[in-house]
Amino acid sequence: MKESFLQDMTTLAESQATRDLIDVLTPYVVFEDVPPRTQLYFSIDGVNMCYILQSGLVKIGRRTDDFVISSLPTPNIMGITNMIPDASGLFLETLSVAKIATLRSERAHEIIADNNAWKLLVGHITKITTNLFKNNVIMTAPTSYDVLKFQLLALMREPDNLRQSTSAAKYILERTRLSRSTVMKMLAQLKQGGYIEMEDGVLKAVYRLPDKY
């Protein structure tokens, strides 16, 4: 796969509509500092929840197998669409102290209606759809090496404090179905070939990766 395509697929879409929608909702909510390793669920006692992420490191995971779906850029909004069924097992988890406001999804819709902000919601949903498409491309890449390349580039785009505290192997294994032996072998050979730079398992740099393994 061409380097430009890999870079594009690992760059999560951002949206001014999301930022503007957060501005609409902010006067009606209270942001709190949420400690690291806190899990937030999209349904609580049958009530759909919406989370406004102002800052911090947050990931979206799946309870059934601890699979990491994606890291989430902030600011962001999750759960506002009512499109995430509780049976999916999806949840948010803070990786650092994060400033987050919580409200019922129904209440978020009321605020949007009162402020005639439906156009902003559509723009926000379009961003979500784009990122879901990119994530699907990454997860269905044709070879194990292509999957690993996507994840290496995604890791390099993570904030420094996350990248420096997470081994490359752990990051990839949490986000793919690749075996540990496959990941360790490919990382070792890429490092030996001078394509990546790692120190104590932490990814320091990615140079031009070979097209094929």
Image (cartoon, rainbow, N blue to C red):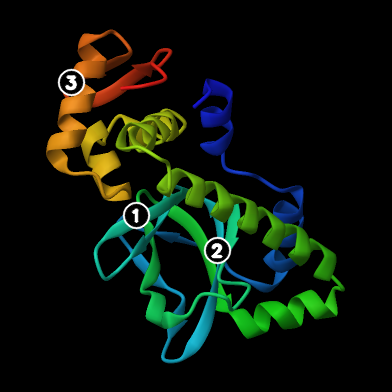
Is residue 167 visible in this depiction of the protein? Answer: no
Amino acid residing under circle 1: Val
Residue mark closest to the camera, 2 vs 3 = 3
| Residue 116 rendering spot, x and y as whole percentages | 87, 73
* Quadrant containing the C terminus in the rendered view: top left
Quadrant of the image occupied by residue 20: bottom right
* Residue that mark 2 sits on: 31
Estimate how packed mark 2 is, as few (under 14), some (14 to 19) or many (20 or more) residues with alpha carbons within 10 Å.
some
- Secondary element under disc 2, as helix, strand or loop, is loop
In the rendered structure, find residue 188 and report the number of the disc placed on it: 3
Residue at the far left in the pictured view:
181
Above or below residue 44? Residue 191 is above
Q: Name the spot of residue 130 as percent of width and height, x first.
A: 63, 51
Residue 145 quadrant: top left
Of the numbered discs 1 and 2, the one sitting upstream in the chain is: 2
Q: Amino acid at mark 3?
A: Ala
Lower sequence index among marks 3 and 1: 1
* Residue 66, image quadrant: bottom left
Where residue 68 is drawn, which disc sits there? 1
Badge 1 crowding class, 10 Å Cα cut-off, few under 14, some 14 to 19, many 20 or more, is many
Q: Position of residue 9 (x, y in %)?
A: 55, 37
